[in-house]
Image: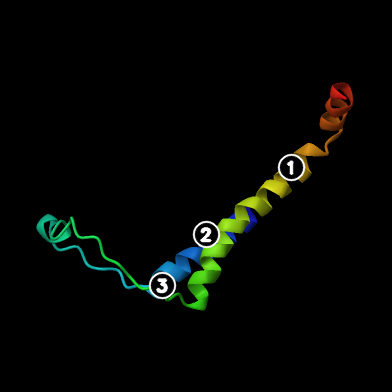
Amino acid sequence: MVLTTIELAYGLYLNITQSPIAPWISWDNTHFDFGTIDVWPVVLCKQTVTAVELSRWAQVFYAFIFFAFFGFAAEARKNYRLAF
């Protein structure tokens, strides 16, 4: 939980500092030109690449930690022996 909180706090920090929050004016302004799909060049700063890769690989890391805690417990090892 601590690692997840740190990861999410870092992602929130990047979202706040990388792009400003647009003020809400009205629904007409929000839905103006709603069907347009913008195309952006692939120019990513180092912080963005770090955030994307961190969010991608952190889930794998957390899965290994989860298995380490619950997959090697005495009860789990007993069930592994029964299965084999």
| Quadrant in which residue 77 is drawn | top right
Quickly name the residue at label 3.
42
> Tag 2: Cα neighbours inside 10 Å, few (<14), some, or many (≥20)?
some
Q: Secondary structure at mark 1?
A: helix
Name the residue rendered at 52%, 64% in the picture.
52
Give the image location of residue 51, x and y in percent: 52, 66
Whether residue 8 is situated above or below residue 72 in the rendered picture:
below
Q: Say which residue appears at 33% left-offset and 70% top-offset.
A: 40
| Residue name at image x 24 percent, y 60 percent | 37
Residue 23 appears left or right of 50: left
Q: State how many labels appear.
A: 3
Mark 3: few, some, or many residues within 10 Å (few <14, many ≥20)?
A: few
- Mark pair 2, 1: CA separation: 22 Å
Q: Are marks 3 and 2 in contact (CB under 8 Å)?
A: no
Look at label 3 and name its amino acid.
Answer: Val
Above or below, 19 relative to 76: below
Q: Earlier in the sequence, mark 2 or mark 1?
A: 2
Task: From the image, tell me which residue sits under label 2.
Answer: 8
